[in-house]
Image (cartoon, rainbow, N blue to C red):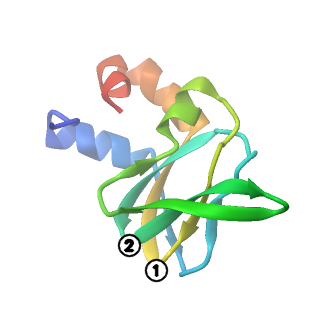
Amino acid sequence: MQILGTEQEAADLMHRCQRIEVNAGDIVVRAGDAGDSMHFILDGRVGVMIPAGEGRTTRVRSLGRYTTIGEMGLVTRALRNATIQAEVASILYVLSADQFEALKADNPALAKSS
């Protein structure tokens, strides 16, 4: 499935994102934090951990390049239900809630496919 219809739409979306680099072991988002952004994994791998009680977490899956994290939280503004931790050095692009709102105003069709 192709989410972005044109190179221009891809460029518009990437222009609104912040590029971040994380090291293995770095926490990208924590369970309980505000769902105020989504992340695109350009390169690397992250683990998805859910709270397991008594301050522990359980890794439920890994996500690799070209996947997204946190899109539902960005839309619903619900609290994060998982902690995301880099398993290896990774490059991510972050779309903030403010940029998502600007995207919806400027390009409603692109915002619906994001």
Pick the residue in front: 67 or 98. 67
Q: Up-down: is 86 above or below 9?
A: below
Secondary structure beneath label 2: loop
Secondary structure beneath label 1: loop
Residue 61 shown left or right of residue 11 in the figure:
right
Q: Quadrant of the C terminus?
A: top left
Residue shown at the point (49%, 76%) measured from the top left? 87
* Occupied quadrant, residue 2: top left
Q: Up-down: is 46 above or below 112?
A: below
Residue shown at the point (52%, 43%) measured from the top left? 70
The residue tagged 2 is: 44
The amino acid at mark 1 is: Val
Check contact, mark 1 vs mark 2: CB within 8 A. yes
Residue shown at the point (24%, 36%) measured from the top left? 9
The amino acid at mark 2 is: Gly
Residue 9 shown left or right of residue 114 in the figure:
left
Q: Position of residue 37 (x, y in %)?
A: 57, 43
Estimate how packed mark 2 is, as few (under 14), some (14 to 19) or many (20 or more) residues with alpha carbons within 10 Å. many
Numbered circle sitting on residue 88: 1
Q: Quadrant of the N terminus?
A: top left
